[in-house]
Image (spheres, rainbow, N blue to C red):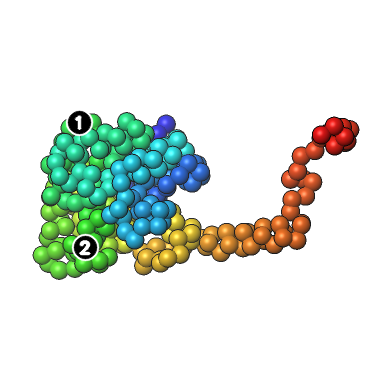
Amino acid sequence: MRVTIDELKEMKSRGEKVTMLTAYDYGIAKLVDETGIPLILVGDSLGMVMLGYESTIPVTMNEMIHHTKAVARGARHALVVGDMPFMSYHVTVDDALRNAARFIQEGGAQAVKLEGGETVAEKVKRLVECGIPVMGHIGLTPQSIHQLGGFKVQGKTLEAGQRLLKDARALEEAGAFAVVLESVPAQLSSLITARSAIPTIGIGAGAGCDGQVQVISDLLGIYTDFVPRHAKQYARLAETIKQAVGEYMGEVKSGAFPTSKQSYSIEEGVVTELARTS
Protein backbone atom coordinates (compact mmCIF):
# COMPACT_ATOMS: atom_id res chain seq x y z
CA MET A 1 0.00 0.00 0.00
CA ARG A 2 1.20 3.52 -0.81
CA VAL A 3 2.04 5.87 2.06
CA THR A 4 -0.71 8.41 2.78
CA ILE A 5 -0.66 11.93 4.20
CA ASP A 6 -2.48 10.63 7.29
CA GLU A 7 0.35 8.17 7.94
CA LEU A 8 2.86 11.03 7.77
CA LYS A 9 0.90 12.99 10.37
CA GLU A 10 0.77 9.87 12.56
CA MET A 11 4.56 9.58 12.29
CA LYS A 12 4.87 13.09 13.73
CA SER A 13 2.52 12.26 16.60
CA ARG A 14 4.60 9.14 17.41
CA GLY A 15 7.85 11.07 17.22
CA GLU A 16 9.00 8.92 14.30
CA LYS A 17 11.33 10.78 11.93
CA VAL A 18 10.19 11.20 8.33
CA THR A 19 12.71 10.67 5.52
CA MET A 20 12.35 12.12 2.04
CA LEU A 21 14.66 12.00 -0.97
CA THR A 22 14.46 13.44 -4.45
CA ALA A 23 14.34 11.22 -7.53
CA TYR A 24 14.14 12.20 -11.17
CA ASP A 25 13.97 8.96 -13.17
CA TYR A 26 12.49 5.45 -13.11
CA GLY A 27 15.63 3.56 -12.12
CA ILE A 28 16.60 5.66 -9.11
CA ALA A 29 12.97 5.99 -8.02
CA LYS A 30 12.60 2.20 -8.04
CA LEU A 31 15.76 1.70 -5.97
CA VAL A 32 14.86 4.42 -3.47
CA ASP A 33 11.31 3.11 -3.18
CA GLU A 34 12.53 -0.42 -2.45
CA THR A 35 14.24 0.85 0.72
CA GLY A 36 10.83 1.70 2.14
CA ILE A 37 11.35 5.46 2.20
CA PRO A 38 7.94 7.12 2.71
CA LEU A 39 8.36 10.27 0.59
CA ILE A 40 9.90 10.88 -2.82
CA LEU A 41 10.10 14.42 -4.16
CA VAL A 42 10.44 15.07 -7.87
CA GLY A 43 12.21 18.32 -7.13
CA ASP A 44 12.69 21.21 -9.51
CA SER A 45 16.32 20.77 -8.45
CA LEU A 46 16.39 18.48 -11.48
CA GLY A 47 16.96 21.65 -13.46
CA MET A 48 20.44 21.90 -11.97
CA VAL A 49 21.46 18.28 -11.30
CA MET A 50 19.85 16.67 -14.36
CA LEU A 51 19.50 19.41 -16.98
CA GLY A 52 22.49 21.61 -16.20
CA TYR A 53 20.67 24.90 -15.57
CA GLU A 54 22.30 27.42 -13.23
CA SER A 55 19.22 27.51 -11.00
CA THR A 56 15.74 26.00 -10.71
CA ILE A 57 14.09 29.01 -12.35
CA PRO A 58 14.25 27.85 -16.03
CA VAL A 59 12.50 24.53 -15.28
CA THR A 60 9.20 24.20 -17.14
CA MET A 61 5.97 22.36 -16.35
CA ASN A 62 6.54 19.98 -19.26
CA GLU A 63 9.98 19.07 -17.94
CA MET A 64 8.57 18.47 -14.47
CA ILE A 65 5.71 16.32 -15.76
CA HIS A 66 8.12 14.29 -17.92
CA HIS A 67 10.30 13.39 -14.92
CA THR A 68 7.36 12.92 -12.57
CA LYS A 69 5.87 10.30 -14.89
CA ALA A 70 9.12 8.34 -14.81
CA VAL A 71 9.38 8.51 -11.01
CA ALA A 72 5.74 7.53 -10.52
CA ARG A 73 6.30 4.43 -12.64
CA GLY A 74 9.23 3.41 -10.45
CA ALA A 75 7.78 4.19 -7.00
CA ARG A 76 5.03 1.85 -5.83
CA HIS A 77 5.17 2.46 -2.05
CA ALA A 78 6.34 6.03 -1.40
CA LEU A 79 4.08 9.05 -1.68
CA VAL A 80 5.34 10.94 -4.74
CA VAL A 81 5.36 14.75 -4.51
CA GLY A 82 5.66 16.86 -7.66
CA ASP A 83 7.48 20.17 -7.27
CA MET A 84 5.57 23.00 -8.93
CA PRO A 85 8.08 25.08 -10.94
CA PHE A 86 8.59 28.82 -11.13
CA MET A 87 5.50 30.78 -12.27
CA SER A 88 3.30 27.67 -12.49
CA TYR A 89 1.20 28.85 -9.53
CA HIS A 90 2.19 32.47 -8.89
CA VAL A 91 -0.23 34.44 -11.07
CA THR A 92 -3.72 33.11 -10.35
CA VAL A 93 -5.50 30.41 -8.39
CA ASP A 94 -6.71 29.00 -11.70
CA ASP A 95 -3.10 28.61 -12.87
CA ALA A 96 -2.24 26.82 -9.65
CA LEU A 97 -5.21 24.46 -9.98
CA ARG A 98 -4.56 23.69 -13.63
CA ASN A 99 -0.88 22.93 -13.15
CA ALA A 100 -1.29 21.03 -9.89
CA ALA A 101 -3.91 18.87 -11.58
CA ARG A 102 -1.40 18.01 -14.30
CA PHE A 103 0.98 16.61 -11.69
CA ILE A 104 -1.77 14.35 -10.35
CA GLN A 105 -3.54 13.40 -13.57
CA GLU A 106 -0.67 13.29 -16.08
CA GLY A 107 2.35 12.88 -13.85
CA GLY A 108 0.97 10.25 -11.51
CA ALA A 109 2.02 12.13 -8.36
CA GLN A 110 -0.05 11.97 -5.18
CA ALA A 111 0.76 15.50 -3.99
CA VAL A 112 2.41 18.75 -5.03
CA LYS A 113 4.86 21.12 -3.34
CA LEU A 114 4.99 24.87 -3.75
CA GLU A 115 7.17 27.59 -2.29
CA GLY A 116 5.97 30.43 -0.08
CA GLY A 117 3.96 31.04 3.07
CA GLU A 118 1.25 33.63 3.60
CA THR A 119 1.55 34.77 -0.03
CA VAL A 120 0.44 31.38 -1.38
CA ALA A 121 -1.90 30.32 1.45
CA GLU A 122 -5.04 31.12 -0.58
CA LYS A 123 -3.82 28.91 -3.42
CA VAL A 124 -2.90 26.10 -1.03
CA LYS A 125 -6.37 26.25 0.49
CA ARG A 126 -8.04 26.04 -2.92
CA LEU A 127 -5.89 23.11 -4.05
CA VAL A 128 -6.67 21.21 -0.86
CA GLU A 129 -10.38 21.96 -1.26
CA CYS A 130 -10.18 20.39 -4.72
CA GLY A 131 -8.61 17.22 -3.31
CA ILE A 132 -4.94 17.86 -4.10
CA PRO A 133 -2.60 17.32 -1.13
CA VAL A 134 -0.08 20.15 -0.76
CA MET A 135 3.34 20.31 0.87
CA GLY A 136 4.58 23.80 1.71
CA HIS A 137 8.14 25.14 1.48
CA ILE A 138 9.45 28.14 3.42
CA GLY A 139 12.79 29.59 4.46
CA LEU A 140 15.21 29.60 1.55
CA THR A 141 12.95 29.30 -1.47
CA PRO A 142 15.21 28.68 -4.50
CA GLN A 143 12.70 30.08 -6.98
CA SER A 144 13.12 33.45 -5.23
CA ILE A 145 16.93 33.56 -5.10
CA HIS A 146 17.11 36.81 -7.05
CA GLN A 147 14.81 38.47 -4.51
CA LEU A 148 16.65 36.87 -1.57
CA GLY A 149 20.07 37.85 -2.90
CA GLY A 150 21.31 34.30 -3.40
CA PHE A 151 21.35 31.06 -1.43
CA LYS A 152 21.33 32.53 2.08
CA VAL A 153 20.14 31.31 5.48
CA GLN A 154 16.68 32.72 6.28
CA GLY A 155 15.15 33.72 9.61
CA LYS A 156 18.24 34.99 11.44
CA THR A 157 16.66 38.20 12.73
CA LEU A 158 13.66 38.71 15.01
CA GLU A 159 11.56 40.10 12.17
CA ALA A 160 12.54 37.34 9.75
CA GLY A 161 11.90 34.68 12.38
CA GLN A 162 8.45 36.06 13.13
CA ARG A 163 7.67 36.05 9.42
CA LEU A 164 8.61 32.38 9.09
CA LEU A 165 6.47 31.45 12.10
CA LYS A 166 3.53 33.24 10.45
CA ASP A 167 4.25 31.51 7.14
CA ALA A 168 4.26 28.07 8.76
CA ARG A 169 1.00 28.83 10.58
CA ALA A 170 -0.63 30.12 7.39
CA LEU A 171 0.28 26.96 5.47
CA GLU A 172 -1.05 24.73 8.23
CA GLU A 173 -4.31 26.67 8.42
CA ALA A 174 -4.63 26.48 4.62
CA GLY A 175 -4.52 22.68 4.82
CA ALA A 176 -0.94 21.77 3.87
CA PHE A 177 -0.06 18.27 5.09
CA ALA A 178 3.63 19.09 5.68
CA VAL A 179 6.11 21.92 5.23
CA VAL A 180 9.74 21.97 4.11
CA LEU A 181 12.05 24.26 6.09
CA GLU A 182 15.14 25.09 4.03
CA SER A 183 18.25 26.84 5.35
CA VAL A 184 16.61 27.95 8.59
CA PRO A 185 18.54 28.23 11.90
CA ALA A 186 18.15 25.03 13.90
CA GLN A 187 16.67 26.77 16.95
CA LEU A 188 13.98 28.46 14.87
CA SER A 189 13.18 25.21 13.06
CA SER A 190 12.69 23.49 16.43
CA LEU A 191 10.31 26.27 17.52
CA ILE A 192 8.29 26.02 14.29
CA THR A 193 8.17 22.23 14.64
CA ALA A 194 6.95 22.41 18.23
CA ARG A 195 4.15 24.81 17.29
CA SER A 196 3.08 22.92 14.18
CA ALA A 197 0.54 20.09 14.01
CA ILE A 198 1.88 19.01 10.61
CA PRO A 199 5.30 17.45 9.93
CA THR A 200 8.23 19.74 9.23
CA ILE A 201 10.82 18.42 6.77
CA GLY A 202 14.21 20.05 7.12
CA ILE A 203 17.00 20.65 4.64
CA GLY A 204 19.76 22.63 6.26
CA ALA A 205 17.39 23.30 9.16
CA GLY A 206 18.83 21.19 11.97
CA ALA A 207 17.84 17.97 13.69
CA GLY A 208 14.79 19.40 15.46
CA CYS A 209 12.52 18.99 12.41
CA ASP A 210 10.13 16.06 12.14
CA GLY A 211 12.05 14.76 9.13
CA GLN A 212 14.76 15.46 6.59
CA VAL A 213 15.00 15.73 2.80
CA GLN A 214 18.12 15.56 0.66
CA VAL A 215 18.85 15.74 -3.05
CA ILE A 216 19.72 12.22 -4.19
CA SER A 217 22.59 13.50 -6.36
CA ASP A 218 24.20 15.09 -3.29
CA LEU A 219 23.68 12.00 -1.13
CA LEU A 220 25.25 9.70 -3.74
CA GLY A 221 28.06 12.09 -4.64
CA ILE A 222 27.06 12.30 -8.31
CA TYR A 223 26.60 16.07 -8.67
CA THR A 224 30.08 17.57 -8.35
CA ASP A 225 29.56 21.23 -9.35
CA PHE A 226 29.29 22.03 -5.63
CA VAL A 227 28.28 20.29 -2.40
CA PRO A 228 25.90 22.31 -0.19
CA ARG A 229 26.79 22.63 3.49
CA HIS A 230 23.57 20.84 4.47
CA ALA A 231 24.42 17.79 2.34
CA LYS A 232 26.23 14.65 3.43
CA GLN A 233 27.78 12.38 0.81
CA TYR A 234 26.96 8.81 1.80
CA ALA A 235 28.73 7.64 -1.37
CA ARG A 236 31.04 9.16 -3.98
CA LEU A 237 29.67 7.62 -7.14
CA ALA A 238 31.16 10.27 -9.43
CA GLU A 239 34.59 8.69 -8.95
CA THR A 240 33.19 5.18 -9.30
CA ILE A 241 31.46 6.11 -12.56
CA LYS A 242 34.56 7.76 -14.01
CA GLN A 243 36.68 4.76 -13.04
CA ALA A 244 34.24 2.34 -14.68
CA VAL A 245 34.09 4.41 -17.88
CA GLY A 246 37.89 4.61 -17.96
CA GLU A 247 38.21 0.83 -17.63
CA TYR A 248 35.65 0.34 -20.41
CA MET A 249 37.54 2.68 -22.74
CA GLY A 250 40.81 0.90 -22.02
CA GLU A 251 39.36 -2.55 -22.69
CA VAL A 252 37.75 -1.47 -25.96
CA LYS A 253 41.03 0.00 -27.18
CA SER A 254 43.03 -3.06 -26.15
CA GLY A 255 40.52 -5.52 -27.58
CA ALA A 256 39.76 -7.05 -24.17
CA PHE A 257 36.08 -6.11 -24.57
CA PRO A 258 33.86 -7.60 -25.80
CA THR A 259 34.64 -11.27 -25.16
CA SER A 260 32.64 -14.30 -26.23
CA LYS A 261 30.52 -13.80 -23.11
CA GLN A 262 29.21 -10.52 -24.48
CA SER A 263 28.80 -11.78 -28.07
CA TYR A 264 26.28 -13.88 -30.01
CA SER A 265 27.02 -16.63 -32.56
CA ILE A 266 25.45 -18.65 -35.35
CA GLU A 267 26.44 -22.00 -36.84
CA GLU A 268 29.64 -21.95 -38.88
CA GLY A 269 27.86 -23.55 -41.81
CA VAL A 270 25.55 -20.55 -42.06
CA VAL A 271 28.49 -18.18 -42.13
CA THR A 272 30.23 -20.29 -44.81
CA GLU A 273 27.11 -20.32 -46.96
CA LEU A 274 26.61 -16.57 -46.52
CA ALA A 275 30.21 -15.91 -47.60
CA ARG A 276 29.82 -18.19 -50.62
CA THR A 277 26.49 -16.84 -51.86
CA SER A 278 26.74 -13.16 -51.07
- Residue 95: where, in percent of width, then height? 19, 39
Q: CA distance from mark 1 to mark 2?
A: 32 Å
User: Does residue 45 sit above or below 97 in this rendering?
Assistant: below
Q: Which residue is mark 1?
A: 130
- Residue 117 percent coordinates (x, y): 16, 51
Q: Secondary structure at mark 1?
A: loop
Q: Position of residue 123 (x, y in %)?
A: 16, 41
SS label for mark 2: helix
Where is residue 67 shown, x and y percent of the image?
A: 40, 43
Depth check: 165 or 237 in front?
A: 237
Q: How many numbered callouts? A: 2
The residue closer to the viewer here, 264 or 132, is 264
Q: Quadrant of residue 271?
A: top right
Q: Observer-nearest residue: 140 or 208? A: 140
Q: Earlier in the sequence, mark 1 or mark 2?
A: 1
Q: Residue at x 22, y 35 (%)?
A: 98
Q: Nearer the viewer, mark 1 or mark 2?
A: 2
Rendered residue at 36%/53% (across/down): 47
Which label number is shown at residue 79? none
Q: Is residue 169 visible?
A: no
Find disc 2 in the rendering and name its residue.
Answer: 146
Q: Is residue 194 left or right of residue 266?
A: left
Amino acid at pointer 2: His
